[in-house]
Image (cartoon, rainbow, N blue to C red):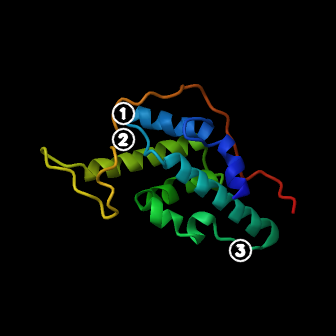
Amino acid sequence: MVFHEASHTLIGPRRGPISEALVAAAAELGTTPHRDLWHVVLFYTTGMSVRNILKEELGVDYEPYIYSTGLFDRAWPELRDAVERYWTPYVEGQQGYEEAAGALLRALTQELDANRPVDGASARPTEHGDADRPDDHTPGAVAFGKEKLPRIDCLDTDLDL
């Protein structure tokens, strides 16, 4: 959790290069990110980074907080598959965060479009009972900027224990 809190400098609700990349990717698709996506990405990135470093450097098995507490499945089950599939390449150093953000938002937007009511049908409640939540994907999002953000490789960190 200490690394999670420190990581808020990279990922916050409306600030930091990764959050800005998520918002920019969503804006390119004419949508906005899920209101908690930034926090899911933060939990996942920090947890998986710590897990990978502990395993590689010390041979220690570690289960990230987002899994060990059941947080993913309790709070954000609708985001889990897409985050695991499309954000992992960034966490593992296989692609930059802008590319991963684009892939993640494309996947989430496709899922959202597939679940939207057709021909004026009313929205159906989800199995998690959040039908009264506002639509987190409203059109017309404005990105915070389109300048190139620096690549931040969270796996190139020395671990001193």
The mark tally for this picture is 3
Say the numbered circle drawn on residue 61. 3
Residue at horizontal 47 percent and vertical 48 percent from the top: 104
Residue at horizontal 32 percent and vertical 49 percent from the top: 112
Please determine whether, in this image, residue 52 is positioned above or below residue 148: below
Place residue 47 in its image quadrant.
Answer: bottom right
Q: Depth check: 150 or 35 in front?
A: 35
Amino acid at circle 3: Asp
Q: Nearer the viewer, mark 3 or mark 2?
A: 2
Dot 1: few (<14), some (14–19), or many (≥20) neighbours within 10 Å? Answer: some
Place residue 81 in its image quadrant.
Answer: bottom left
Mark 2 lies on residue: 137
Residue at horizontal 49 percent and vertical 58 percent from the top: 85
Residue at horizontal 70 percent and vertical 63 percent from the top: 52
Mark 1 lies on residue: 30
Dot 2: few (<14), some (14–19), or many (≥20) neighbours within 10 Å? Answer: some
